Image (cartoon, rainbow, N blue to C red):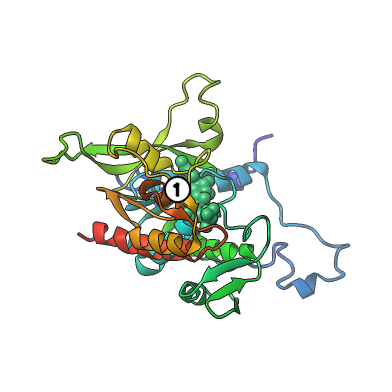
């Protein structure tokens, strides 16, 4: 039985060059789902007559895939790519989204769930500590906290991370590609007097994370790419996926070696990470705990102010490059 004619949808819109354009789906605030009621109160005790509006499975398939592939097409050329949607990467995206609605920003996050290590405060405890002046970031974000003098405490780390994530996802010029791993960096020759083999970073090489995890037991599964004049890497300290870009810079001889993250020293670690967030090689800014692997900075343990403010600085450093 062929689907009713009304459901055969029109093809995704493309411009004169056949490039998908962001179709305006008329994003509206959420309204009651069932078509009859307009408020939750109106649904009370009306379950006998309750029914959802009609749907055909292919409409769901098209609603998801049309948008996703239009986004893949649209962000294939981005202004900035952020690798890693942990607390630093999301803070960076938040600052860029607020300041530069003109920029196309793609966030590539290997995990299905973005947020990195910021869903808990430390050793699975809920509360998240941020040392002042990181409270100014929480004020800007609108996250409530308890003031303990030199530091503040957010009652649950997930309150910070979910609020930050929701603000970032609400920016129309930012797209999160989660469950997607950066497998390599796109480079262009940028020889210098000191290094004829020097490169500048010009984008990222991506694949579904589940594919990235099985290159050793499947035949060749080639990646996809996103071109961008600037990449911001915030992939965290070393681990299964961590410190990705800086380790790749070493293997492509753009960095001689990594300093390696040092032992825990809260007071020196946080200042160092924020102050040294910077463009490591042309076209690549590194922030958050990934940076500790470059400079051999100490780790700070269960305090997150440096992640937020490293994100603020990473956004600043990125705009210096983009606007130069
Ligand atoms: O949360 P993380 O790991 O990294 P940061 O730098 O945003 O925040 C670090 C912070 O959580 C701490 O480690 C705290 C402060 N503790 C310090 C200490 O002393 O222990 O987020 C990195 C994100 C994760 O979500 C990864 O999944 C993702 O980056 N990621 C990648 N995404 C895409 N492609 C990759 N190759 C990749 N590698 C990591």
Q: Is residue 262 visible?
A: yes
Picture coordinates of residue 174, whole percent (x, y): 43, 57
Q: Residue placed at 42% from the left, 60% from the top?
A: 92
In which quadrant is the N terminus drawn? top right
Residue 202: where, in percent of width, then height? 28, 43
Q: Residue at x 25, y 57 (%)?
A: 321
**Residue at point 29%, 40% (across, down):** 255
Q: Is residue 27 left or right of residue 7?
A: left
Label 1, secondary structure: give it. loop
Camera-nearest residue between 210 and 61:
210
Closer to the camera, 71 or 162?
162
Looking at the image, the residue that sits furthest to the top is: 219
* Horizontal and vertical percent position of residue 252: 31, 33
Provide the residue designation for mark 1.
Answer: 261
Is the shortest distance between ligand 1 and the CB of mark 1 under 8 Å? Answer: yes
> Can residue 172 be seen from the camera position used here?
no
Report the number of numbered marks. Answer: 1
- Quadrant of residue 184 in the image? top left
């Amino acid at each position: 039985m062929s689907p009713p004619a009304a459901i055969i949808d029109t093809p995704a819109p493309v411009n004169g060059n056949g490039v998908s354009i962001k179709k305006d789906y008329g994003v509206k605030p959420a309204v009651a789902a069932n078509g009859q009621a307009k408020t939750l109160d109106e649904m009370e005790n009306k379950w006998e007559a309750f029914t959802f509006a009609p749907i055909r499975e292919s409409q769901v398939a098209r609603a998801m895939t049309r948008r996703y592939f239009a986004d893949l097409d649209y962000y294939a050329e981005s202004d900035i790519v952020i690798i890693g949607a942990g607390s630093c990467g999301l803070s960076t995206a938040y600052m860029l989204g607020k300041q530069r609605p003109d920029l196309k920003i793609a966030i590539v996050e290997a995990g299905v769930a973005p947020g990195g290590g910021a869903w808990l405060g430390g050793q699975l405890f809920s509360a998240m500590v941020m040392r002042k002046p990181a409270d100014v970031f929480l004020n800007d974000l609108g996250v409530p906290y308890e003031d303990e003098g030199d530091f503040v405490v957010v009652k649950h780390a997930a309150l910070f991370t979910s609020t930050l994530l929701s603000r970032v996802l609400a920016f129309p010029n930012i797209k999160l590609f989660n469950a997607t791993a950066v497998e390599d960096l796109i480079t262009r020759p940028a020889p210098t007097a000191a290094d004829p083999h020097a490169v500048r970073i010009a984008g990222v090489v991506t694949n579904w994370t589940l594919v990235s995890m099985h290159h050793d037991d499947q035949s060749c599964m080639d990646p996809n790419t996103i071109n961008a004049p600037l990449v911001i890497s915030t992939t965290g300290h070393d681990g299964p996926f961590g410190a990705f870009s800086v380790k790749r810079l070493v293997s492509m001889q753009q960095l001689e070696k990594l300093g390696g993250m040092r032992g825990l020293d809260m007071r020196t670690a946080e200042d160092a990470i924020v102050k040294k967030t910077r463009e490591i090689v042309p076209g690549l800014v590194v922030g958050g705990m990934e940076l500790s692997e470059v400079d051999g900075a100490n780790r700070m343990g269960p305090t997150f102010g440096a992640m937020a403010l490293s994100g603020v600085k990473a956004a600043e450093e990125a705009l210096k490059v983009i606007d130069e």
